[in-house]
Image (cartoon, coloured by chain):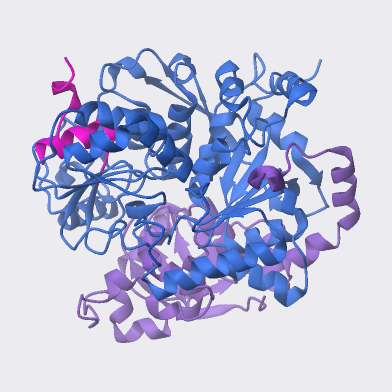
Chain colours: A blue, B purple
């Protein structure tokens, strides 16, 4: 009998096209997602070489990053963004790539539209010129972000030169407490291992707390694998995965579906397989998390005090923490709870799906956001927008005093006009609190949709558990 | 890609851990559809005041910085976004190598494809470099970094990336030469989907 393998090794082995002497492996890519920001230079490269896209049938495009979230009948005001979105549509059309342009009714964030349309499937290799591609790992796919040179390589050859990563088992056991979410699991993990803790690794999330998550919650966890430095993060497929996929546009149908499910059932890690690295997290001990600093690893439980740079031994590490607190305008030794905020952003590839919107709406229903806070709700895709409206969620948000916008990355990356003003504070359900990430000089506290909604009501960082009976 | 030549240069010190690619080049400059003109935007928000004047205490605004082909920075350099604009901006500014104790995976891959050498050194060597500005020699062929003190440190790089840098090999050209292997894989592995059905 062959050696027991992890799902990560199984995925790797099934996709090696060639292993030339002295070179990295050629890894076959089953699905290549493309968006407007990291692809134009790759298409220009193809044109310069006179090469076609090898497999447009395995490529899917959407515009999201520099795409406005104002009503779609309005033009794109920023001429540079308008040119980029127009170039994207020209490129996809010229090279025969199926895509959702600015006015397409299926447009959305690239990591939302893949699963939504059934493009993301277990056992696949998925790449995109975007570091949050690990989102698709929730389906038991090996999914990772690549640079623009690699986008060009995949467009041209459907292959990528890759070196095998280490395997990292993040085991999460136990029941989450009331008000504690998938977002808190991943923020707690990153706070523990640091933003470089997963470098060189592909994470497999295992354990009862992970199995208990819905597919949308699993996407939230896998999405932020890169914030722990990991190349990718994935979760073995199970019945929840198949139930989510069944009937979606690009999922297999009929006999092909049965054959696919039978194959997918062989993917989970074999009994007795070992990992290069392991860590254990007790889900029952977790609390709602919030970040205080300028990287996603600088997070604490919402009731916990901000750490003191004076207690850090390493000089550069100490200076880095001091620099972060100076940028954030915060003092150590006190919790963030009660800290006034200017903006609440609910959206991004981390937290813009139906369950995220429902969770935020449940908190906001029948209440009013604090008048000093601008609250923005940005659905992950136009399909989600319609579904939320059919459920009346948009009305709950509007009645509470929040903005209900069109789909896109929006204030997660602040390329589309949705941004903080210098010095402003936000509670954001996105994935990065880097300096200026949500607008030059803006200051971000990352948290779950529940914590964000509770903070919108309070006008300050809040503990959602006080609102839950 | 241009061949990577040996470097002998002063270095600039950026004593910050976890420098993310949003700092290397802020997202608002990513609306370009070109690779050019990014050197002026390198570390833009650390480099310039709101009115556009240079911040005098930022390392790249010192008179010596212009001569530096090597940047020495804190742990885990290049974390965050996959934007290849980060190594484009660093090389267009004039850097040919970055020294740290560790690099984020995607940044490292992107750098190697753009003639920018990421050099990971042990903590003690890193500390010596961070202590005071000076000059270093980088020899990729022998994989050595020589400090001002004369101390020579060997650094790791995979053989393929090294050969690509030294010989200026085009990686896409290399893969395109293996058309037969790609066709054989395609023939054995029918696709799991057809994205063209998405608009149906």
Coordinates of residue A335 in the picture (x, y in percent): 12, 36
Q: Is residue A227 left or right of residue A469?
A: right
**Can see residue A241?**
yes
For the N terminus of chain B, the quadrant is: bottom right
**Can see residue B148?**
no
Residue A360 location, quadrant: top left
- Tell me, yes or no, whether the highlighted magenta stretch contains residue A446: yes
Q: Nearer the viewer, residue B31 or A73?
A: A73
- Tell me, yes or no, whether the highlighted magenta stretch contains residue A300: no
Residue A446 location, quadrant: top left
Q: Is residue A287 above or below residue A305?
A: above
Coordinates of residue A356 in the picture (x, y in percent): 36, 32
Residue A73 location, quadrant: bottom left
Residue lying at 55% horizontally and 72% vertically, measured from the top left = B138
Q: Nearer the viewer, residue B81 or B186?
A: B186
Q: Nearer the viewer, residue A399 or A266?
A: A399
Q: Is residue B145 above or below residue B160?
A: below
Q: Start and end of the magenta stretch?
A: A445-469
Residue lying at 26% horizontally and 36% vertically, measured from the top left = A395
Q: Nearer the viewer, residue A422 or A376?
A: A376
Coordinates of residue A465 in the picture (x, y in percent): 18, 22
For the C terminus of chain B, the quadrant is: top right
Callout count: 0
Q: Is residue A88 above or below residue A301?
A: below
Coordinates of residue A410 in the picture (x, y in percent): 36, 54
């Amino acid at each position: 009998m062959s050696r027991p393998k992890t799902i990560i090794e199984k995925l790797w082995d099934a996709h090696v096209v060639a292993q030339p002497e002295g070179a990295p492996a050629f890894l076959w890519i089953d699905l290549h997602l493309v968006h407007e920001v990291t692809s134009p230079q790759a298409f220009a490269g193809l044109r310069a070489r006179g090469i076609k896209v090898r497999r447009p049938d395995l490529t899917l495009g959407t515009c999201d990053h520099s795409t406005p979230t104002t009503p779609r009948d309005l033009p794109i005001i920023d001429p540079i963004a308008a040119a980029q979105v127009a170039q994207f549509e020209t490129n996809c059309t010229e090279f025969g790539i199926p895509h959702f342009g600015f006015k397409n009714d299926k447009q959305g964030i690239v990591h939302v539209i893949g699963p939504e349309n059934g493009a993301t499937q277990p056992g696949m290799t998925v790449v995109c010129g975007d570091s949050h591609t690990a989102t698709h790992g929730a389906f038991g796919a090996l999914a990772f972000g690549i640079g623009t040179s690699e986008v060009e390589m995949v467009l041209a050859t459907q292959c990528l030169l890759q070196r095998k990563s280490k395997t990292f088992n993040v085991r999460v056991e136990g029941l989450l407490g009331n008000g504690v979410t998938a977002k808190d699991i991943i923020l707690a993990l990153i706070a523990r291992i640091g933003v470089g803790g997963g470098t060189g690794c592909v994470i497999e999330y295992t354990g009862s707390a992970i199995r208990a998550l819905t597919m949308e919650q699993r996407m939230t966890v896998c999405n932020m694998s890169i914030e722990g430095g990991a190349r990718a993060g994935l979760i073995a497929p199970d019945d929840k995965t198949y139930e989510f996929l069944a009937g979606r546009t690009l999922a297999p149908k009929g006999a092909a579906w049965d054959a696919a499910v039978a194959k997918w059932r062989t993917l989970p890690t074999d009994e007795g397989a070992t990992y290069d690295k392991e860590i254990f997290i007790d889900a029952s001990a977790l609390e709602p998390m919030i970040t205080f600093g300028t990287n996603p690893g600088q997070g604490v439980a919402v009731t916990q005090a901000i750490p003191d740079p004076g207690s850090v031994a390493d000089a550069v590490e100490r200076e880095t923490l001091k620099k972060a607190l100076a940028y954030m305008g915060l003092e150590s030794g006190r919790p963030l709870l009660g800290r006034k905020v200017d903006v609440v952003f609910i959206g991004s590839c981390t937290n813009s799906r139906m369950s995220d919107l429902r969770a935020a709406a449940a908190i906001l229903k029948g209440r009013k956001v604090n008048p000093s806070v601008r609250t923005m709700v940005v659905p992950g895709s136009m399909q989600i927008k319609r579904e939320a409206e059919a459920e009346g969620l948009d009305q709950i948000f509007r009645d509470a005093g929040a903005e209900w916008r069109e789909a896109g990355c929006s204030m997660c990356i602040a390329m589309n006009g949705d941004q903080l003003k210098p010095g402003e504070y936000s509670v954001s359900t996105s994935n990065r609190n880097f300096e200026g990430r949500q607008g030059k000089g803006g200051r971000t506290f990352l948290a779950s949709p529940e914590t964000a909604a509770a903070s919108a009501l309070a006008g300050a960082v809040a503990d959602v558990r006080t609102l839950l009976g | 890609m241009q061949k990577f030549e040996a470097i002998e240069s002063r270095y600039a010190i950026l004593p910050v851990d976890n420098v993310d690619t949003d700092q290397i080049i802020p997202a608002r400059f990513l609306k370009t559809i070109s690779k050019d003109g990014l050197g002026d935007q390198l570390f833009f928000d650390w480099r310039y005041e709101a009115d556009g004047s240079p911040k005098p205490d930022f390392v790249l605004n010192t008179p010596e910085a212009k001569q530096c082909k090597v940047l020495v920075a804190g742990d885990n350099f290049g974390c965050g976004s996959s934007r290849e604009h980060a190594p484009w901006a660093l090389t267009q500014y004039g850097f040919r190598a970055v020294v740290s104790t560790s690099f984020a995976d995607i940044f490292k891959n992107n750098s190697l494809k753009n003639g920018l050498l990421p050099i990971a050194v042990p903590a003690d060597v890193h500390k010596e470099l961070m202590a005071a500005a000076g000059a270093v020699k980088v020899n990729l062929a022998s994989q050595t970094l020589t400090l001002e003190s004369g101390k020579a440190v060997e650094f790791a790089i995979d053989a393929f990336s090294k050969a690509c840098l030294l010989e200026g090999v085009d990686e896409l050209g290399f893969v395109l030469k293996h058309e037969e292997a790609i066709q054989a894989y395609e023939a054995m592995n029918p696709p799991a989907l057809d994205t063209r059905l998405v608009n149906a």
